[in-house]
Structure formats: structure tokens, C-alpha cells
Image (cartoon, rainbow, N blue to C red):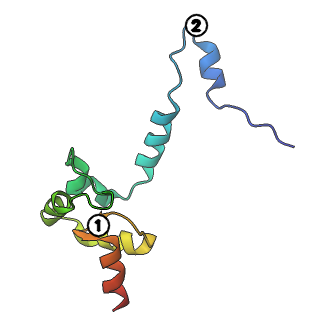
Amino acid sequence: MATWVNPLAEVIAEDDDPAPFDGWAVLLAAIEDRRPDWQLDAACRYAEGVTFFPERGEPTEPAKAVCARCPVDLLCELQALELDTEHGIWAGQSARKLKRSRAA
């Protein structure tokens, strides 16, 4: 059976006073590297304090207002449909509404 080896072990061992390893930062960087390029232009990327995955009963208007001025809303809609997502606001519509419009 193969043994997993931490690829950072050498780097950490060489450092006399290593900084704490932040696994979340590494994970988020990896996710960022795999995002489609169009997401760099998405209005939601820069919308602080706006919830795109609201809980039941929470307002959706703020997210929809951001989507209304987004230059890549069509690509967002296509991704939501491709992912077959069931939650969130995508391209100014709820995931459920997107599914219904696709089925029609």
C-alpha cells in the first residue's frame, strides 16, 4: 500500500521557524486556479455583503440586482444548468426557476 507524503514536508523541514500551514488558503488557491476565466468578470465576484445562496425567506433582490448589471450572466446561467444546481441565485434567477425554464 502506498504511503501519502506531504509535498510540503521538505519545505517545512528546511525552515527553522515555519509559519503555520493554512490548509484553507491552499484549498482556496487551488479552487481559484480551476475557475472558468469568465468568472473574473462576474459582478458577483466583487459584491461584498450580498448573499447569492440565501436561506428560505431571506431576500433575493440584492443578488438579483447585482446580476442585472453582470456582463457574463449568460455564462453563469449555462454553468448553473450544467451543474444542475438546486440552490442559489444564478444570472438573476433562482436555481429552481432556471430548471423550470429549461424544462419548458
Is disc 2 in contact with disc 1, using a CB cutoff of under 8 Å? Answer: no
Lower position in the chain sequence, tag 2 or tag 1: 2
What residue does disc 1 label?
90
The x, y position of residue 19, in whole percent, is 50, 16
Using the image as rendered, state which of residue 100 and residue 71 is in the foreground. Answer: 100
Image height of 20 relative to 89, above or below: above
Badge nearest the viewer, 2 or 1: 1
Q: From mark 2 to mark 1, how far is it between C-alphas?
A: 47 Å
Q: Residue at left 60%, top 19%?
A: 12
What residue does disc 2 label?
16
Residue 49 left/right relative to 15: left
Residue 43 left/right relative to 55: left
Q: Quadrant of residue 3?
A: top right
Q: Seen from this angle, which residue lies furthest bottom?
A: 104
Image height of 102 relative to 65, above or below: below
User: Residue type at mark 1?
Assistant: Trp
The x, y position of residue 57, in whole percent, is 27, 61
Quadrant position of the C terminus in the picture: bottom left
Q: Seen from this angle, which residue lies furthest right?
A: 1
Q: Residue at left 19%, top 55%?
A: 43
The x, y position of residue 92, in whole percent, is 21, 68
User: Residue type at mark 2?
Assistant: Asp
Q: Residue at left 30%, top 72%?
A: 77
The total of numbered circles placed on residues is 2
Quadrant position of the N terminus in the picture: top right
Q: Residues within 10 Å of mark 1 (few under 14, many from 20)?
A: many
Image height of 11 relative to 5, above or below: above
| Local SS, label 1 | strand
Q: Seen from this angle, which residue lies furthest front?
A: 57
| Local SS, label 2 | loop
Residue 27 left/right relative to 63: right
Q: Residue at left 27%, top 53%?
A: 40
